[in-house]
Amino acid sequence: MVWAALWTVYIVWGSTYLAIRVSVETLPPFLAAGARFLLAGIVMYAFLRVRKGKDAMKISMSQLRSAAIVGSLLLLGGNGLVMTAEQDVPSGLASLIIASTPLWVVLYRYLARDNVSRGTLVGVAVGFAGVAVLVLPGEQPEGVSLGGILLLLIAAASWGNGSFLSSRIDMPQDPAVSTVFQMLLGGSALVVVGTALGETSGLDAGAFSTRSLIALAYLVVMGSLVAFTAYVWVLQHAPVSKVATYAYVNPVIAIFLGWAVLAEEITPAIFVGASIIVASVAFIVRKESSPAAAEDVVDAEARGLAGADASA
C-alpha cells in the first residue's frame, strides 16, 4: 500500500505539468487554475465535513488569514504563474525549475537563522547552479521566452515561501482542513487576478478544446484530490525520508512525459541542468535528517499540489 500510494504521487504529480501545458492551450491560465482549486476545494470540504463533522471544519480568524496568505503564495504566486509560463515553456523544463522549490525552502530557513548544515548549503548552491544552466540565454529549446523562465523562477520562490511560512504561522492543525481553506482562498485569489487581467473579457467557451478541458478535469480529480489523498495517507504510514523522494522523482517523470506525449525537445542544457538539480535535491532530502528540516523539504513540493499541485 505504501508503494502504491508513493507511485500514485510520483506519476500523478509528475504528470500535472503535462496536463497544465495542455490545459493552457485554449484556457485562460489564472481562471483555469482558479476553477481547478475552487472545484477541488469544494469537493474536499464537503467530503471532510461529512466524514469529520461540522466542528472539525471550524477555524479561527487568525488561521483563516494565515490560510489566505499561504494559499495565495502557493496557488496564485506558485501555480498561477506556472500555468501562465507554460503557455510558452515546455512542461519538462517548467518541472525542472519548479523542482528547485526545496532549495528555496532551505534558503528561507537559512535567512531565518535556522540551524542549516554547511553540507546542505553546499547542496543548495549546487542546485541553483543547475537552475542557472537552464536559464542561460540561448540554452533553452526554440521558442521559449525569457519572460516565461523568469515567471517560473518567481513561482518557485513563491511556492517555497508559502511552504516555509506554513509551519511558522497559525495554520489549521488538520493538514486536510488546512489544504481545503488554502484551495478555496487561493483559488478565489486566482479568479480575482484573472478577472483583473482581463481573462474574462471576450471569453468564448466554444473556443475551449476538448483536450484542454479533459486536462483541467485531470488536474482537479487526479492532481488535487487523488494524489493529495495518497500523499496524506503515505505521510502517515511511511518515513518522511521515503515520502520526500517524490521531490526529485517527479521532474524526471515530467520530462519523460513531455518528451513522449508532446515531443518536447531535451537539449544538452536541460539534460545537464536536470542532472544537477535532481542530484542536489536528492542530496538535500537525505542530508536533512532532523524531523523539522525533513518536513520542510517535503512540504515544499507537496503543498505545491494544494500547491504543483500542493503540484505542480
Image (cartoon, rainbow, N blue to C red):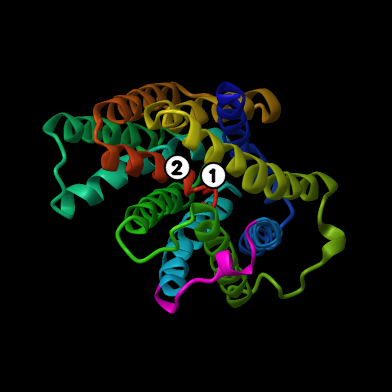
Is residue 38 found left or right of 127 in the rendered image? right
Residue 204: x and y in percent read 82, 67
Residue type at tag 2 = Glu
Q: Are marks 2 and 1 in contact (CB under 8 Å)?
A: yes
Does the rendering let one see residue 149?
yes
Residue 147: x and y in percent read 45, 53
Query: How many marks can you see?
Result: 2
Residue type at tag 1 = Ser
Nearer-the-camera pick, 290 or 206? 290
Measuring 51% from the left and 30% from the top, which residue is drawn there? 250
For the residues labelled 2 and 1, the Cα–Cα distance comes to: 6 Å
Nearer-the-camera pick, 82 or 71? 71
Image vertical order of residue 79 relative to residue 13, above or below = below
Measuring 52% from the left and 62% from the top, which residue is drawn there? 182
- Residue on which disc 2 sits: 301
Q: Mark 2 vs mark 1: which is more N-terminal?
A: 2
Q: Which residues are magenta?
A: 52-62
Measuring 62% from the left and 30% from the top, which residue is drawn there? 8
- Residue on which disc 1 sits: 311
Nearer-the-camera pick, 292 or 7? 292
User: Is label 2 in a helix, a strand or a loop?
Assistant: helix
* Quadrant of image for the C terminus: top right
Measuring 48% from the left and 26% from the top, which residue is drawn there? 249
Residue 14: x and y in percent read 57, 33
